Amino acid sequence: MSTETPRRRIDAAYADLQARAAAFVDEVLIPFEVTAELAGGPLPLPDQLLIRTKAMEYGIHGGPHATRHGGHDWSVTEWFLVEEQLGRTTNGVAWYIPNAYNVWKHATPAQQERWLIPALRGDLHDAYAVTEADAGSDPSGMTTTAVPTGDGRWVINGEKWFVTFGSIAAVIVVMAYADVDGQRLPTLFAVPADTPGIETVSDVPFTHTYPHGHPTLLFTDVIVHDDDIIGGLGRGDDLQRMWFMEERLGIAARCVGAMQRLIEETVEWAVNREQGGARLIDHQGVSFPLADSAADAAAGRLLGLEVAAMADDGADPKLIHGKASMAKLFCSEAANRCADRALQIFGGRGYMRTTAAERFWRELRVDRIWEGTSEIQRIIVARSLERRGVQAMLT
């Protein structure tokens, strides 16, 4: 009988990938964090290009996508482990790594040739537009429409909020209700960003200092074609559910990575800093919060890896969806607790924007909001307990 823990078996199987991802974060990304913070987010173009080039050299770009498209055919577990490492960075410096949304896996070969392959080369960026003023965590309230003209064209009208990368994207994946014979069919459209009728309504700053914003985009009589439909008419909900599952698991992974770095830096500080004739870590007011954070990080990691393994094993997608929400809920809430504890232990230094503790304290807050708030995740988990069964969700 093996004495290895599941974690050790996973780490051993993917040791090389983890080491490359960790080295990339330590050697390439982290050195740019303070520069990005003091610059208000964006890095100079040469630094952006360096990150893109190094990401490709280290082989950690576009991992889940097929090798024929420029990715690496990673399993979900491999992807989770890389996202975990990327979560150890602040200021969104990892956003310069060439990547693309998972919905392109279901695109036509022509769409993949036009949008996916260049994105994985770093030649362009995509954006995803789903949220609306009255349809945030509840996409059923969406009002954006796509009306056919009868000659292979569609007219899109609507307003989308929080469109990450919307200010720099070459193509925008837009979720709209296709009006077909009186039916409202949720459908994804690949909309070139330079199409007439797309207007940036606002692009306000947010709490985190990232290279790109989340603008509000207005679509007024925007013309697209049949060839721009991704995955087929009416498949928007299914594709978006898969997207949400991946995004929520990715948030869990990055939150775990953030906790790991926060704990490492805080322990180092607490061990070497003396107050009142003793090391900080010798005071229970410091050591107990660190212990709680360590328990949170370890538990969150195991939960996330379990969901990743289920996805790799082809488990029931609805069960995976529920457990991904559980992982996102737990890890995002835990990471916020961890960041607050770390900042408190660092004291005044923790409140300086040049410290990782302060930046994580600001940045991790959104993980309890985007891709479905913590309240929405609780609803999903509660429904999963009822529909999938308590044992299925807990074991």
Image: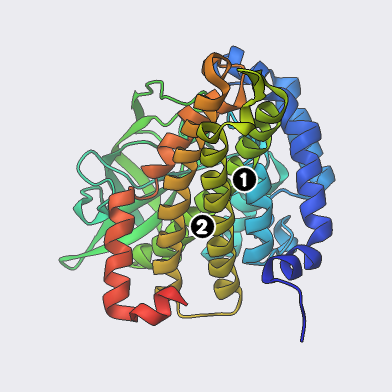
Identify residue type, mark 1: Gly
Write the residue at 40% across / 74% down. Answer: 393
Q: Disc 1 and disc 2: Cα gap in Å?
A: 13 Å
Q: Earlier in the sequence, mark 1 or mark 2?
A: 2
Q: Give the residue pinned by disc 2.
A: 249
Q: Is residue 232 visible?
A: no
Q: What crowding class fits label 2: few (fewer than 14 Cα within 10 Å), some (14-19), or many (20 or more)?
A: many
Between residue 78 and residue 203, name the one nearer to us: 78
Identify residue type, mark 2: Leu
Write the residue at 84% across / 57% down. Answer: 16
Secondary element at tag 1 = helix
Secondary element at tag 2 = helix
Q: Residue furthest bottom?
A: 1
Q: What crowding class fits label 1: few (fewer than 14 Cα within 10 Å), some (14-19), or many (20 or more)?
A: many
Location of residue 27 (image quadrant): top right
Tell me, for residue 257, which label it has, or none.
1
Between residue 158 and residue 136, name the one nearer to us: 136
Image quadrant where one finds the N terminus: bottom right
Write the residue at 76% across / 73% down. Answer: 4
Between residue 193 and residue 129, name the one nearer to us: 129
Write the residue at 74% across / 60% down. Answer: 72
Left or right: residue 61 versus residue 220 is right
